Amino acid sequence: MIRSVALISAALLASVAAAQAAPTAKPIPLDVALQAARTAVDTCMGNGYKVTAMVADTNLIPVVVLRNGAGAGTVDVARRKAYTVLHKNMSSLEYGKSINFTPPPPLPPGSPPRPPQVFEGDPDLTPFGGGVAVKVGGETVATMSVSGAPGGDKDNACAEAGAAKLAAAMK
């Protein structure tokens, strides 16, 4: 009995320590995240692009994922763009420039997605533009990522529009 109590106590202390070590993400109101993602999608739709837009917190937990007919693979690419923003402390487009990445030409509509490339030994990093930090008072509070437009620069423009909407609402 004493051994069981000791094991339970040790496990409880370990879980408390782990919880204290994990950074606490600032809460992102659902309605605000939805408006920001909608802004990103609408910006791309205005240019004829079907995309996925994702708002994620700083623990990479998605708050909103919107797709307007973009391929299913764009959801994972949007997640990888958000991951890149948080792990490299720069936009995914800036990361691509920092490693001198030249994107391949866009795939024709209906093509299967390319297999993901691995950069710096990390299969979640991506140099394609479209992932940006949402900053309030100089602090990253969320990420906005967009995937599906024919080129990372176009994804990036839509992500920037959504990020500006989110940052303004979270001030």
Image: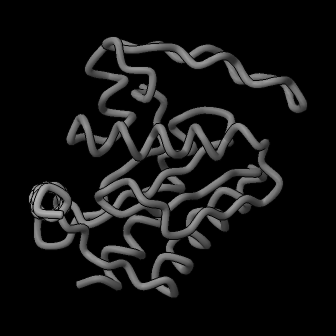
171 lies above or below 56: below
Report the residue at 32% width, 43% height from top.
85
Check the image and name the residue furthest to the front: 1
Q: x, y (%) of residue 136?
A: 19, 72
Q: x, y (%) of residue 159?
A: 48, 55
- For the C terminus, the image quarter is bottom left
Relative placement, left or right, of 111 versus 155 is right
- For the N terminus, the image quarter is bottom left
Q: Quadrant of residue 35?
A: bottom right
Report the residue at 77% width, 22% height from top.
107
Q: Quadrant of residue 29?
A: bottom left
Disc count in the image? 0
Check the image and name the residue furthest to the right: 110
96 lies above or below 160: above
What's the coloring here?
one colour
117 lies above or below 67: above
**Closest to the observer, 5 or 11:** 5
**Closest to the observer, 19 or 65:** 19
Q: x, y (%) of residue 55?
A: 47, 63
Report the residue at 47% width, 38% height from top.
80
Relative placement, left or right, of 123 versus 15 is right
Relative placement, left or right, of 87 versus 69 is left
Report the residue at 54% width, 45% height from top.
78
**Closest to the observer, 41 or 21:** 21
Q: x, y (%) of residue 145?
A: 48, 51
